Amino acid sequence: MGVIPDYSLPPLTFAREGTRIADLIRQVPTTASTVTTYEVNAAATAAAPVAEGGAKAESDPEWAAVANPVEKIAHFATVSTELLADVAGFQQIVAEELFGGLQLAESDQLLNGSGVSPNLEGILTNASIQAQAGAGTDIDELLAAITKLRTVGFTEPDAVVMHPDDWNSSELATAKDTTNAYLAGRPFEAGPATIWGVPVVLTTSIASGSALVGNFADGARIYVREAPRLFADPYTLATSNQVRLIAEQRLALAVLRPKAFCSVVVNTA
C-alpha cells in the first residue's frame, strides 16, 4: 500500500492592506549612517527690472542643512525546526508575514514617526509642512489643501493619503438629486479612486480624521541603507529545535520640500 498523501493546505498569511507609503517616494541607496540633505526654505524672489546704470536687486535663497539619521525597523518570529521540515514552504509563509508587518511599521514611520531615535521623523510630524484646518466638508478641505500646494508649495500633488473610514465618509457625502441618484460619477465609476483629479491612497497608517496631500515624488526621499531582508538565527535556540526568522531594514527619510505637503483635518461629524 502506498503512502497516503496529505492534502491539507499550508497556513495562510494574514490579510494585509496593499498600500506601501514608500512606493510613493523616490528611493536612493546610501552607505552612510546619517544622510545630510538640504531643505528648501526660501526662493530667490528679488528679481526686478533694472534701469540703465541702476543697482540690481539681491535675492537671498535659503537652504537649511538637515541631518537625517538611518534607523532600523525589525522584528522576528520563532519557529520550530519540525514545523519547517514538515510543512512545505512554511519558511516562505513566515517570511511573507514578517515582511508584511515590516511594511506596516515602515508606512507608520514614514507618516507619523516622532523623530526621536530610533524613530524616523515622519512627514506629518515635520513642523514645516503646510496645514489645512477642517472647517468645511472633506471634499472642500482637500481642494483647499491641493490649492495650497499649487500656490504656496508651487507643486502639483501626486497623491492624497486618507484613512479608509474617511474616504467612505467622503464618498457618502457626494451630492445626490431628489431621486437619491449621485450627481457625480461615483460609486459606479470605473478605475482607481481620485479626488479633484488626484489619486487617493488608502491606508490605516494615517489616523482617522486626518489626510495628507502631497507631491511625494519630489517632496521627499527615502535613503535605503539596507533593503528589507530576512535571515535565520539557528543557534540561539538550537538546543530546543527552534529557529528565529528575523526581518529588518535600515533607512532614512528626508523631507526636501516641506511646502510640497499639506496635512488636512477632515470633517468626521
Image (cartoon, helix red, strand yellow):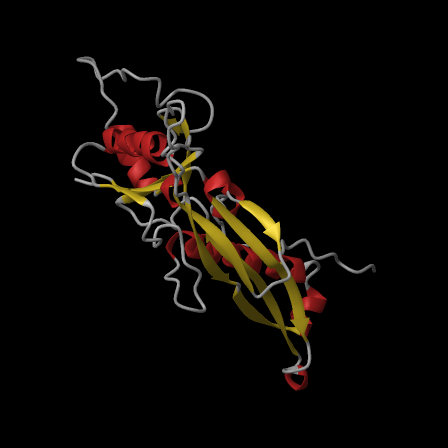
The front one of 246 and 83 is 246
**In the displayed structure, would residue 62 be above or below residue 228?**
above
Q: In the picture, residue 3 is in which quadrant?
A: bottom right
In the current view of this chain or complex, which residue is farthest to the bottom? 239
Residue 56: give x, y in percent of width and height: 39, 32
- Can residue 191 be seen in this snapshot? yes
**In the displayed structure, would residue 259 be above or below residue 225?**
above
The front one of 24 and 173 is 24
Residue 141: give x, y in percent of width and height: 24, 33
- Can residue 11 be seen in this snapshot? no
Residue 47: give x, y in percent of width and height: 39, 30
The front one of 79 and 205 is 205
Q: Which image quarter holds the N terminus? A: bottom right
Left or right: 139, with 269 as reference point: right
In the current view of this chain or complex, which residue is farthest to the front? 53
In the current view of this chain or complex, which residue is farthest to the right? 1
The front one of 54 and 126 is 54
Number of numbered markers: 0
Q: Which image quarter holds the C terminus? A: top left
Q: Residue at x 40, y 54 (%)?
A: 122
Residue 15: give x, y in percent of width and height: 49, 49
Q: Residue at x 44, y 37 (%)?
A: 215
